[in-house]
Every structure is written in C-alpha cells, then in structure tokens.
Amino acid sequence: MRKMTNVPESGEVLPLSSIYRLIKKAGAIDVEQEAIKALRNYLERVGIKIAERAIELAKHEERKTIKAIDIILAITQ
C-alpha cells in the first residue's frame, strides 16, 4: 500500500490508515486500497447501528451519557 494520511475522507469517520493497520495485524501481506475502503464502510455501518442502539438504551435510563454497558448491551442484543 502506498502513502496514506490519517485524515478520513469527507463523510467518513474511520481513517484508512487505521483500517490498513487492522488488516495487517490480522496477518495480511499486502492490502488493496479498495479492500481497505470496503472494510471501513462495513465497520462504520455496524458501528453506527451499535451506537444508535446504545443511545436508545441510555435514553431509556434517562441518561445523556453513553456508558460502556450501553455499548456492550447494544452489541449483544
């Protein structure tokens, strides 16, 4: 993979360089740019769904602060 900045593209949350490191940590020798973008898009969609559910759980408890337990419950439900 070529030179990459740590700044996400417009509208994206996760930097490509972080996703690249994640894939490399899993054991990849080389990673195509489109593969990195595909995984980033998937992780962002899943992350947003989990966060939305965690927000619902916190609101149900009449809290504005999202706690770790909200995230854990959102993941396991």
Image (cartoon, rainbow, N blue to C red):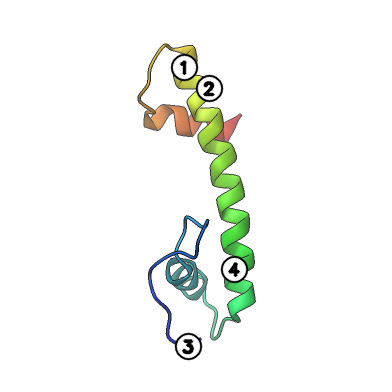
Residue visible at 41% across and 11% down in the picture? 62
Q: Amino acid at mark 2?
A: Glu
Going from N to C along the chain, the mark reached first, 3 or 4, is: 3
Closest to the observer, 27 or 5: 5
Residue visible at 44% across and 20% down in the picture? 58
Is residue 72 found left or right of 37 in the rendered image?
Answer: left
Q: CA distance from mark 3 to mark 1?
A: 44 Å
- Residue at the limit of the structure toward the front, as seen here: 10
Q: Amino acid at mark 1?
A: Lys
Q: CA distance from mark 3 to mark 4?
A: 14 Å
Above or below: residue 43 compared with residue 3: above
Q: Position of residue 21 (x, y in %)?
A: 44, 72
**Quadrant of the rendering where the C terminus is positioned:** top right
SS category of the residue bearing label 4: helix
Q: Position of residue 17 (x, y in %)?
A: 43, 72
Residue visible at 48% across and 26% down in the picture? 55
Q: Give me the disc on residue 2.
A: 3
Q: Amino acid at mark 4?
A: Lys
- Residue denoted by label 1: 59
Q: Give me the disc on residue 56.
A: 2
Above or below: residue 54 compared with residue 49: above
Q: Are marks 3 and 2 in contact (CB under 8 Å)?
A: no
Q: CA distance from mark 1 to mark 2?
A: 5 Å
Q: Amino acid at mark 3?
A: Arg
